[in-house]
Image: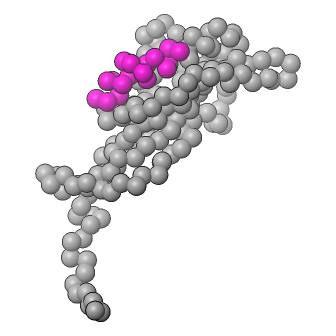
Amino acid sequence: MTTQREHEIIIVDSLQAELQRLKADCLVVRQNQAAPIPKYPYCSYTITTPMLENSGTYGNNNEDQKYYQTYQQVWSFTVQSDNDSDALQLAVNAYNFFAEKGTLNLNDKGVIVVRLSNVANRDNLISIEYEHRYGFDVTFSFTHEVNKEDEFNENYFDKVKLNN
């Protein structure tokens, strides 16, 4: 079973590799960390919705005795820069990765790109100057697995008394 942290590493490393392939000097970092801010430009992400409501149920894989259920997360990606054109181009590059090449790349690693939002301006006025920001959201789908022997005891009820 792939953990949440492993999914995060897969997504971030894949996006970082694509930006490097495009010769973009743009670090991908988690937002809201107690760490120094990277030099411009950089791409930050946050998991805005760790688990969307799922009205489905678990399925069973009889071969490995595991139950599974898919769930979705929403991630927000934002490119920050001191140059408006650079920020927009990097955001478009990241968006294109998730819309095209990354779809297959991530799918092979158990991460499904379900939906992309529009690339939007997210500029931020800092004191007397702007931090140019463009971003978009991605909905990912993952599979949660539960070992049948650990969680589902078929002999849980020995007897049940029904009235009428």
Which stretch did the figure color magenta?
A: 92-108
Instruction: Find the residue positioned furthest to the bottom.
Output: 163
Q: How many marks?
A: 0
From this viewpoint, is residue 87 visible? yes
Residue positioned 37% across, 41% down in the render:
142
From this viewpoint, is residue 29 visible? no
Q: Is residue 88 left or right of residue 113?
A: right
> For residue 150, which quarter of the picture?
bottom left
Residue positioned 26% across, 66% down in the render:
152
The answer to if 98 sits in the magenta stretch is yes
Residue 132, image x and y in percent?
70, 17
Residue 10, image x and y in percent?
39, 31
Residue 44 sits above or below residue 18 on the image:
below
Residue 126, image x and y in percent?
80, 23
Q: Is residue 118 left or right of residue 32?
A: left
Quarter the C terminus occupies: bottom left
Instruction: Find the residue positioned furthest to the front.
Output: 164
Residue 146 sits above or below residue 90 on the image:
below
Residue 111 sits above or below residue 159 on the image:
above
Quick one: 58 or 63, which is closer to the camera? Answer: 58
What secondary structure predominates along the stretch shown in magenta?
Answer: helix
Residue positioned 32% across, 30% down in the render:
107
